[in-house]
Amino acid sequence: MKTIKLITPVALFAAVVLASSGVCKAGQAVAAATATPAPEEEAKSRISGSVGVALTNAYIFAGLIQDKDAFIAQPYLTLNFQLYEGEGFFNDVTFMLPLWASVHDINKPRPINGNSTLKNWYEFDISPGFSFTLAKNWTFTISDYIYTSPGDYFVTSHNLNLAVSYDDSGLLGAFALNPHFYFLQELHNHSGLAVKNGVAFSSDAAQGQYYEFGIAPGHTFAEKSTYPVTLTFPSTVGFGSSGFYGQGFGFFSTGASVSVPLAFIPSSYGTWTTSASGLYYYLGSTSSFYTNSSERSQGVFAWTIGTEF
């Protein structure tokens, strides 16, 4: 009680002194009494991802035709969990969980033992892994790519995936190539042609390897407008071991993609984008022969809509 009695006259004295000196004005006193602390900056979410669907006329994996001249829908969902973020040489570590499916109006027959009721669900892939960003521009990814077929078109396979990409926009600006390198090592069963002694789809073939090099130069027009248009020109070449392709060369592809943000959708629903693309494929002789195509030249057209969050 003595402490309260002492503080009260001191506070009254201070108020009188401030008022007489003109420092404490009535409006300032009211503002000070009613002011609330500034809200803390909202913490950045460490969970991000993307979801969408692509509609296409053909599905070609690593230069191997899976199905074509059919209605094909390929929905996807990717979840990213950031584990580390820093400003030094080591910038980011993220756990990734991509899910991808391919649902077809199937044109190809199933194996003799294929009896699943999910006839149109050709493929479902899951590829858990980690990505590491170094020196801000280099991204390394390692994952287990698991190929499954709910429709019983092929057996489940596990594959070690290693990828490297480099953001060269700081060096080349508008002429950036955005190069990438990709390596796949079959671990269990086969994702390639499983060639042994010239015979494809041999269950006892050696585990194969796949190598991919690619670039994707592009440019964004009207970048500051509500609907900027991004034009990209991806080109990719794929090679493989003799067990994967039956020869070294697998395919070459090139084409163009145009994308536009759907800015009319509220940002609270994510960042929506739609794109259309066309790719020309030139397949290796074994790639086309063993996937039931007499034409080494193939065209793939796709329309995609999706959002990032």
Image (spheres, rainbow, N blue to C red):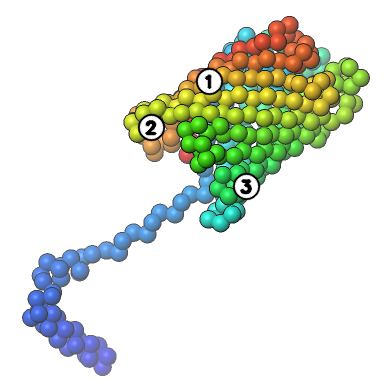
Query: In what element is the residue under mark 2?
Result: loop
Q: Earlier in the sequence, mark 2 or mark 3?
A: 3
Q: Amino acid at mark 1?
A: Ala
Mark 3 or 1, closer to the camera: 1
Residue found at x 43% / y 29%? 220
* Residue 68, numbered circle: none
Label 3 vs label 1: CA separation?
28 Å
Q: Amino acid at mark 3?
A: Phe
Query: In what element is the residue under mark 3?
Result: strand
Residue found at x 73% / y 30%? 211
Q: Amino acid at mark 2?
A: Glu
Mark 2 or 3, closer to the camera: 2
* Residue 256, numbered circle: 1
Q: Earlier in the sequence, mark 3 or mark 1?
A: 3
Q: Quadrant of residue 2?
A: bottom left
Q: Which residue is mark 2?
A: 223
Estimate how packed mark 2 is, as few (under 14), some (14 to 19) or many (20 or more) residues with alpha carbons within 10 Å. few
Residue found at x 53% / y 20%? 256
Between residue 162 and residue 38, name the one nearer to us: 162
Between residue 165 and residue 277, name the one nearer to us: 165
**Residue 134 on image: x %, y %:** 60, 49
Q: Quadrant of residue 251?
A: top right
Estimate how packed mark 1 is, as few (under 14), some (14 to 19) or many (20 or more) residues with alpha carbons within 10 Å. some
Q: Which residue is mark 3?
A: 132
**Compared with residue 217, is residue 164 higher up or lower down, i.e. above or below?**
below
Residue that lies at the very extreme toward the bottom in this rendered image: 2
Query: In what element is the residue under mark 1?
Result: strand
**Residue 202 on image: x %, y %:** 87, 21
- Disc 3 to disc 1: CB gap under 8 Å: no
